[in-house]
Image: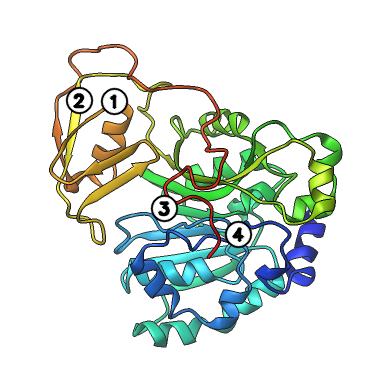
Amino acid sequence: MREEVQDYYGKTLQSSDDLKTDACCTDTNMPRHVKTALTKVHDEVLTRYYGCGLVAPEKLEGARILDLGSGSGRDCYVLAQLVGENGYVVGVDMTDEQLDVANRHVEFHADKFGYNASNVEFRKGYLENLEDLGLEENSFDIVVSNCVINLCQDKAAVLKQAYNLLKPGGEIYFSDVYSDRRVPAALINDPILYGECLSGALYWNDFQNLAKQCGFLDPRLVEDRPLAINNEAIKEKLGNIQFFSATYRLFKLDELEPACEDYGQAVIYKGTIEHHPEAFTLDKHHFIETGKVFPVCGNTWRMLHDTRFKEHFEFIGNWDKHYGIFDGCGTSLPYDTEAGSNNEGGGCC
């Protein structure tokens, strides 16, 4: 299957228009500063983009970022602008054709961004074998990935190695495709369905459990949208299985608890993160307005206090008293099943 995927993304697909789903419609709610960064990315890089989400989290200045499945380099070149000249971005991909596009424009982008030297590099490798690339453990602030982990057969290996490469308090911030139930084996072995990021998708609850097993103890859903299947033959094969594009953030924080526990704590956002003066969105259920006291569970407290976000919040309370489970901690399907029900919905750009 690995060779099938390499051929599909290296030879079969020539642009995002060749895909059979609306997975690449990711620009609808794109922040203005990210849109501005995209205008500086080379056209050839943009046309070979196959992502399903936006992997540009907050507070990136000076960060060291690893992009898993970097493809033609679109996200890397956007992130290179957001981390600045003192930050660094490493892209990893297994497809020669995609890496050729990415590497062809390294100097173009350094000149375009006004940097003395490029702050991006690309390496060929398999995401299941990151240890072969000589990357230092505990050396990255953030790991990103855009619609690629579903293409890996050993997803646990990818998550475990990403965990090892992250600094304590770092995070994986990534978009991928998930299903509302487990995909039958017969569909998993279909190379077209696999290449389209469908049959390799994890059932959402299996993903939650896998992430926890790999050390990411409280996965947080940032945003999601249902995927539209534009090919009738593929629709027929899939039957009633629903697929979703979803963005998660997974923190490397060893003290997180299995559930959201209430210690009577709260935070106040100072409004000091660049491009986010009015509010900070930690995840789908934590939209924290500037200056407002916002009650949080113990895990959310740690995600803000023990990470790069600490200086941007005031913290109220401590760990002296436990009040039970935090209200709203549920286990049903976390995704919105209709386009438009999650923020602005899943409309195409």
Residue type at mark 4 is Gly
Looking at the image, tell me whether mark 4 or mark 3 is earlier in sequence order.
4
**Mark 4 — residue?**
69
Inspect the image, locate mark 2, and give the three-letter code of the amino acid beneath it. Gln
Residue drawn where x is 57% and y is 64% of the image:
70
Q: Earlier in the sequence, mark 1 or mark 2?
A: 2
Residue 142, disc = 3
Q: CA distance from mark 1 to mark 2?
A: 7 Å
Q: Assess whether mark 3 and mark 4 are in contact (beta carbons under 8 angstroms).
A: no
Name the side, left or right, on which 55 lies relative to 266. Answer: right
Rounded to the nearest angstrom, the CA distance separating label 1 from label 3 is 22 Å
The three-letter amino acid code for the residue at tag 1 is Gly
Residue bearing the label numbered 2: 265
Residue 33: give x, y in percent of width and height: 34, 68
Q: Earlier in the sequence, mark 4 or mark 1?
A: 4
Q: Secondary structure at mark 3?
A: strand
Which badge, 2 or 3, comes first in the chain's sequence?
3
Residue 296, position as x, y percentages in the image? 26, 29
Tell me if residue 247 can be seen. Answer: no
